[in-house]
Amino acid sequence: MDKKSSLKPIIVTALITALVTAGTGIAWFKLMGYHAPHSISVPASGGTGAGETKQLYTCGMHPWIITEEPGLCPICNMELTPRRGGDQGKPGEAGEIRVDPVTVHNMGIRTTRVEETPLVHTIRTYGHITYDETSLVKVSPKVSGWYDKLHVDFTGAVVEKGRPLYDIYSPDLLAAQEEYLSALGSPSQSLLESARSRLSFFDLADTEIQAIKAAGRVKRALTIRSPADGVVIEKNAVEGGFVNTGTTAYTIVDLSKVWVEAHIYEYEMEMIEKGLDAEMTLPYHPGKVCRGKVSFIYPYMERGTRDLVILLEFENPDLFLKPDMFAEVFIRTKGKGTGLTIPSESVIRSGTRNIVFVARGNGRFVPREATLGIPVDGGRVHVITGLAPGETVVTSGQFLLDSESRLKEAVRKMMEPAPPPPDEEEEAEEDFFGDMEDES
């Protein structure tokens, strides 16, 4: 072996080191015009005879580094281990890498089996508490007049059905009272009922009408009472102020039941349905869990956020839940049967592909592209294609394996034999006949 040939493996090893540290190995290989074999052999000092057979040593992380004496790997500086003859010639999947069992332990590589589990997914999202729109009540005078007195004079007041809200003075109400008092002395029952109905149409309670009958005279201002239980969330009435017919004086809402507007992603739409159980926790009261149900699913997406809003319904008898509170929401879906699942940490997500490393035994690992479905409870993910039941996948240390797999692939491409140069005689012959064709 001449001196030039014996130096080539050493040059290759040095260039691979440059590939790892500076990322320029490919350019150097092309500049040198060198194409090495698939296994890089680092010769020991002194060399051996052509016919001698010795124990060879290799690196568990870089199996193409082969030496005749123990030492350190020129790439990762790990201690070389004895190379087993049975490791050669075994067929494997594309991209398969081999790691010494001792190195596997030192790398902290852990594995688990692909299992078939129920595809149950708990949706975890956020939401905010809002009013139950079905319980909103607006109080508006049926006649024009003046607010003579306010019995509820601030927003946020809790009112009960039948509680006085305000007294109103109105010429229309005065005329209606006179008509009613006149009808009381009339023998016509229909006339009396008509006069009484007119007063009730002005939202006067039966107690007010009875008070007019008992007094036997017209009252200057009449009291309008609350039509429902709830909390005043809007107040436009001002004592002494004039109000037109139909103007909103108060807005009242019942807070004994509230809604929560929760947001879910598009891929979760299939799993959501009315009646599902929901849980909610609030930042201001850690540890307290409120339980409700999905009551409505909006039939359109939010344009700005590209998510779907759903309404959850919660009982609130003690008014513990306040509108506009932020909440963390959990909705447990019913699932879609069973399927193959693996731990989520097993997947290397590159943005365009999902890679999982499959353990083949004896320190062999294979990168496998997988098609993933929905996340599954327990920190797992549904695997649609790419894995089979019972296979073993790597759950820890797969990023080191991925780096090794990429490095091995890059070195393999660099070491592919260069295409043979075109025969000079053939080129000359092609040029000769080409010139003749041009002349003709």
Image: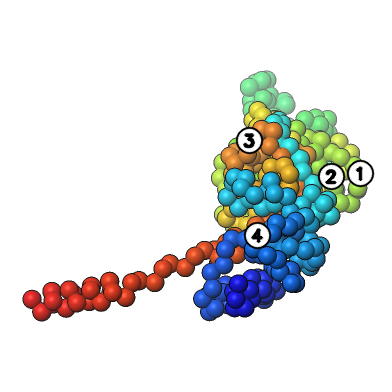
Look at discs 4 and 1 and give the one toward the viewer: 4
Query: Dot 3, how many residues are within 10 Å of its Cα: few (below 14), some (14-19), or many (20+)?
Result: some
Asked whether, in this view, residue 344 is left or right of residue 316, the answer is left
Q: Please tell me whether mark 3 or mark 2 is closer to you in this view.
A: 3
Q: Earlier in the sequence, mark 3 or mark 2?
A: 2
Q: Secondary structure at mark 2?
A: strand
Q: How many marks?
A: 4
Q: Which mark is residue 287?
A: 1
Pick the front one: 85 or 209: 85
Q: Is residue 380 above or below residue 1?
A: above
* Mark 4 and mark 2 residues within 8 Å of each other at the beta carbon: no
Q: Is residue 379 above or below residue 410?
A: above
Q: CA distance from mark 3 to mark 2?
A: 39 Å
User: Which of the marked residues, 4 or 1, is nearer the chain's N terminus?
Assistant: 4
Distance of label 1 from label 2 (alpha carbons): 7 Å
| Vertical side of 79 occupied by 440: above or below | below
- Residue at which label 3 appears: 388
In the figure, residue 341 lies in which quadrant? top right
Specify which label sits upstream in the sequence, 1 or 2. 2
Q: Which residue is mark 4?
A: 51
Q: CA distance from mark 3 to mark 4?
A: 47 Å
Callout 3 touching callout 4 (CB < 8 Å): no
**Mark 2 crowd level (few <14, some 14–19, many ≥20, 10 Å Cα):** some
State the SS at label 3: loop
Whether residue 230 is visible, yes or no, is no
